[in-house]
């Protein structure tokens, strides 16, 4: 007898968050967030300061433990493993392994100041993935070329502009071969004239099929590359949908008010 055909041919979401709640002290900063990202999709997360956007990203990466709900990345429940139909909390080492598949780029570049651009990029593959250094260096150079910094391999962070440092940070995250990239306001700390070069790299990455969640106030970027825009206020998703709908024809007054300020 042949195996039964799959029940559904729809692809599994790469990220699925359901009813995510998180409190700090007595304050609930995520009040039941639902969010789905399909493989290859770019989701832009918008919203005023304090909405819980960074906290949500940190939950996806298990840098925060959630109080309720569940997040799955590539079908795996974040922070848990399923054995015999039951969920077991992961130990620290297993969490680190799970986190390895997710690249994160922050507002601040967080490069190792005493390492060159190339040194920053090869650090993870050599130490964590135990790649032979020669191989890591070869890949590292290719990644630096990909972010437009082939000629800066030997430069130290302090010799690079903020935009260049942020591009090194992106290359460093990519060196771990993530299946998901999380960006938390990657251009907010940059001088305006340096924003474009970082967004260009992110546009390339998106076109290349990388799955991304991007917290940003760059509406132009969202309009250009987002498959879906999620607008968050006060720990909850207020509105979500294709950029043309959420950005150009928002249904909710809070979205309209926010967009009127940032556009
Ligand atoms: P956003 O990124 O949308 O600006 P955040 O996720 O940074 O929002 O913060 C949401 C709320 O949670 C804010 O009120 C913030 O002060 C609070 N918060 C975030 N992290 C912590 C923490 N580690 N301890 C206490 N409160 C926190
Ligand atoms: Mg934030």
Image (spheres, grey):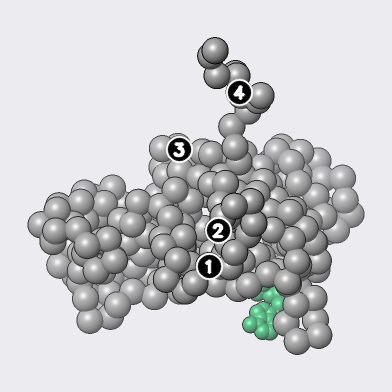
In the displayed structure, 18 sits above or below 194; it is: above
Q: Residues within 10 Å of mark 3 (few under 14, many from 20)?
A: few
Closer to viewer: mark 4 or mark 3:
4
Residue furthest to the left: 134
Give the x, y percent position of residue 45: 65, 55
Look at 37% across and 60% down and name the residue there.
Answer: 173
Secondary structure of the residue carrying tag 4 is loop
Look at 47% across and 74% down and name the residue there.
Answer: 92
Callout 4: CB less than 8 Å from ligand 1: no
In the displayed structure, 68 sits above or below 196; it is: below
Of the four image quadrants, the one with ligand 1 is bottom right
Label 1 or label 3, whichever comes before in sequence order:
1
Quarter where residue 23 is shown: bottom right
Q: CA distance from mark 1 to mark 3?
A: 30 Å
* Residue bearing mark 1: 90
Q: Quadrant of the N terminus?
A: top right
Callout 1: CB less than 8 Å from ligand 1: no
* Residue bearing mark 2: 81
Q: CA distance from mark 4 to mark 3?
A: 25 Å
Secondary structure of the residue carrying tag 2 is strand
Q: Is residue 211 visible?
A: yes
* Image-based side of 176 in relation to 210, left or right: left
Closer to the camera in the image, 134 or 110 = 134
Contact, CB < 8 Å: mark 2 with mark 1?
A: yes
């Amino acid at each position: 007898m042949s195996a039964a055909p799959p029940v559904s041919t729809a692809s599994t979401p790469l990220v699925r968050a359901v009813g995510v709640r998180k409190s700090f002290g007595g304050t609930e900063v995520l009040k039941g967030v639902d969010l789905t990202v399909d493989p290859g999709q770019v989701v832009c997360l918008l919203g005023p300061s304090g909405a819980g956007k960074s906290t949500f990203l940190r939950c996806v990466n298990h840098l925060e433990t959630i109080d309720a709900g569940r997040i799955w990345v590539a079908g795996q429940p974040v922070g848990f493993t399923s054995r015999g139909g039951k969920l077991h909390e992961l130990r620290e080492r297993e969490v680190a392994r799970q986190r390895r598949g997710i690249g994160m780029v922050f507002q601040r570049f967080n490069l190792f100041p005493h390492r060159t651009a190339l040194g920053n990029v090869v650090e993870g593959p050599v130490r964590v993935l135990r790649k032979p250094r020669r191989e890591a260096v070869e890949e590292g150079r290719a990644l630096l070329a990909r972010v437009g910094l082939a000629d800066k391999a030997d430069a130290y962070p302090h010799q690079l502009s903020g935009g260049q440092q942020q591009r090194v940070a992106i290359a460093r995250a990519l060196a771990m071969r993530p299946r998901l990239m999380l960006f938390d306001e990657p251009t907010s700390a940059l001088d305006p004239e340096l924003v474009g070069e970082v967004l260009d790299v992110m546009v390339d990455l998106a076109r290349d099929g990388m799955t991304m969640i991007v917290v940003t106030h760059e509406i132009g970027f969202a309009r250009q590359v987002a498959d879906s825009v999620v607008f968050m206020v006060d720990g909850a998703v207020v509105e979500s949908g294709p950029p043309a709908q959420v950005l150009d024809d928002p249904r909710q007054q809070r979205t309209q008010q926010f967009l009127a300020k940032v556009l």
